[in-house]
Amino acid sequence: MNMKNNFISEVMKSLWSEQSELYQDVYRRFKSNPLNELVEELRKRIDQSAGLIRGYDSPTFSEVFLPSTGCSHCLKESVFCGCSFCDFVSNDVEYFAKMKVIRDQSEEAYAQLICYAFKTSRGENVSASLSEAITLFDSLDVDEFPDTAYYMLFGQNQLYKKRPFQVEIEARASSVTKDRLCVWKSHLPARRLIVRMGVEVGDELLRNQWLNKSITDNEIYQAIEHLKESKCKSNANILIGIPGLNERQSINMFIDSVLWADVAGFDQIVLSPLIYVGASLQSYIATHNGSEGALFDCHTGFVSICAIYEGLVSILLREPSVITKIGISVFNMPVHWKQEKQAIGNSEDEEFVREAYDGLMDFNVQRDVHRILSLYSNLQKTQLYSRYQSRVSTQSSNYIDTIYDLSKKLSMLLWHKDWEDKLNTLSLS
């Protein structure tokens, strides 16, 4: 799907313009440097950040974040214009530019760096967790993770003393093909492969014209089919909160999206609350909000714990069977708790809110619906919930109007003279 000239792509290009300029400058400066010096520099960086590369570690789940050239959807022709809600890149632009220099000059050296990072952070011939996540932005993208790196990592090494039950990887739905899955399964150091995909919402229009995913429903359906035929498992990430939408709109979209993902045939569905991060659209809205801000009275898309519980309980009551598929994001949810805690301060409701967050994280293991319902009942007695209800009762359910109003304000703020021409590229039908 070609979304190059749509409105939200232009917005993201503008928000990321400084990062694009920095990336291009770093790439120009280092592409003529001796390759061995650049490789050595990045090896030292890997040594210093081995603990960060190994993000999670427990008997049941471990995750390793491998170095790469970055997200090919976010970075096109040295210009950043990726998903509007996402940012895992802006703090490390120079690093990604240097990795790109190495990738362009020597696929072998690039693959060796990836393998070095895994061995440095995870070790060799180690005791495996039940589930091992080996994470890049898109593990099935041969530009980011070439076959040379795959065979060097999995074909030439004894990674684990005993094979883990499963390996989890990230991929865009458009990258999931039978050929790529066949390569991954050829030396898979586990009994099964799970492919995690960022579906985000079940509404294709919103997914592409506002979240800037550039992924169609048909690509998602085809990916699920390829995974089933290859005897792999599919995992859908669903957002709780959409940049610029109010809580009512976000929660309605969240409920519909989970039910859509269930019907679509996903084996697992991970719920990820929207968080403020880097150069994302929600962070930009928050920065320019406030009584004097150009985006005054615009919603950021961040939803309260009350909204999360309301949506989750609604799903569990409407479709009890989905409980076997649902999981809570182990990354986003703790960050969401910290950000909500900052928002509510030291209120009398803090204890109830903390228990509610703990209950969500425990749900991943216990699947205790009765506890979720009990915690929801406790939340409903708090002042936080009363304020939430008061807000939602006055909010519109029409997200199209909300997006158009916000887009108009964004256009005027970002482009001044030709804002009307930019706004005319917005397609919401």
Image (cartoon, grey):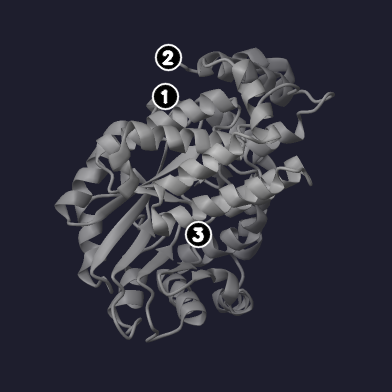
> Which sits in the foreground, 357 or 179?
357
Q: Which mark is residue 429?
A: 2
Which of the labelled discs sits on residue 205, or is there none? 1
Residue drawn 51% across and 56% down?
330
> What amino acid is at disc 1?
Leu
Q: Quadrant of residue 253?
A: top left
Is residue 88 visible to us here? no
Local packing at callout 2 (Cα closer than 10 Å; few below 14, some 14-19, many 20+) is few
- Residue at point 64%, 20% (across, down): 406
- Residue drawn where x is 69% and y is 28% of the image: 387
Point out the tag, 3 or 1, that comes first from the N-terminus.
3
Secondary structure of the residue carrying numbered label 3? loop
Q: Residue furthest right?
A: 292
Alpha carbons under labels 3 and 2: distance apart? 35 Å
Give the residue pinned by disc 3. Answer: 69
- Residue 124 location (% of width, % of height): 41, 85
